[in-house]
Image (cartoon, rainbow, N blue to C red):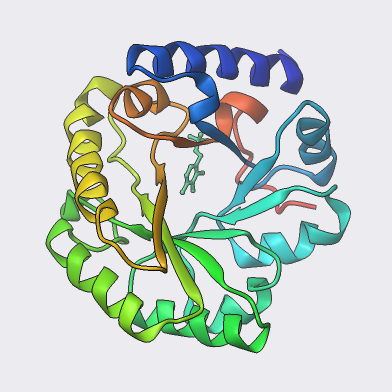
Amino acid sequence: MSIGGNIEYIKKVKDEAARRSGRTGDDVLLVAVTKLHSTEEINEAISCGITDIGENKVQEIMDKYERVNPVRWHLIGHLQTNKVKYIIDKVSMIHSVDSLKLAQEINKRAQQHDLTMDILIQVNSAMEESKFGITTEETGQMIEDILNTCPNINIRGLMCIAPFEDDPEDAREYFAEVKKLYDEYGRIEHPRLDFKYLSMGMSNDFEVAIEEGSNLIRVGTSIFGARDYSKKMG
Ligand SMILES: *Cc1c(COP(=O)(O)O)cnc(C)c1O
């Protein structure tokens, strides 16, 4: 199947899942995850209607940035504080904020560039499964600390990576728990808290994620095929 055909298919599945949760496909943003794929493949996806792409490594964004056609870039992987400066003027949203220290570095670099950065807080409701993300219990305090100390950050929502399950049904409860947090903290009234994105769902589990309330899915393999981890992207 071609990249364009895959995108059409995912949009159809996304639309059906959104309808099952009382919404439409337009309510769910598709972010194409382009890590380890070439700029030619990325530009093909953009020509097929992709408006947002996700990368998980700073270096890959730097390597590809000049050769990719205009698109919104999302940093979706773990971000080290010493690398924020390289991508602060390139990405439109950072999904993986998991410490106050990282938020404060993003804030500092955003100030230097005279911009306000949209971020999501990465939560991890099953701590033993993943190295990154804060616990559900820490979420409220983290939001409060960012609002109090980071004037150049807008908090736009939450992100999570469900533990990989052979059966995506097993991730349903996990997604539902993060959706509950999203609804709870989205009610906070503050000029720099404007929840719009609940980033959850990947190739293997995005249907279930949408059914549980996701409005942003990050899909790589189902668009571009399997990643070749032996090759450094070029
Ligand atoms: C790689 C990656 C994805 C996409 O995974 P697929 O299974 O290829 O769809 C989504 N989110 C994050 C954070 C990733 O690193």
**Closest to the observer, 176 or 128:** 176
- Residue 229 in the image, given as x and y percentages of width and height: 60, 45
Q: How many numbered markers are drawn?
A: 0
Q: Position of residue 59 (x, y in %)?
A: 67, 67
Residue at 77% of width from left, 63% of height from top? 63
- Does residue 34 appear in this view? no
Q: Nearer the viewer, residue 154 or 57?
A: 154
Q: Position of residue 55 (x, y in %)?
A: 60, 52
Instruction: State which quarter of the image contains the N terminus.
Output: top right
- In the image, what residue occupies the spot 77% across and 40% down? 42
Residue 178 visible in the shown view? yes
Residue 21 position (above or below residue 32): above
Q: Is residue 54 left or right of residue 81?
A: right
Say above or below: 36 vs 84. Answer: above
Q: Residue 140 in the image: state x and y as whole percent.
A: 19, 65
Q: Residue furthest left?
A: 137
In this picture, residue 29 sits left or right of residue 191: right
Q: In the rendered view, would you say 175 is above or below 95?
A: above
Where on the picture, by quarter, is residue 51? top right
Residue in the foreground of this view, choosing between 140 and 135: 140
Query: What residue is rendered at 27% in x and 79% in y?
Result: 145
* The quadrant where residue 87 appears: bottom right
Front residue of this view, candidates 158 and 55: 158
Q: Which residue is at 35% across, 45% downward?
A: 161
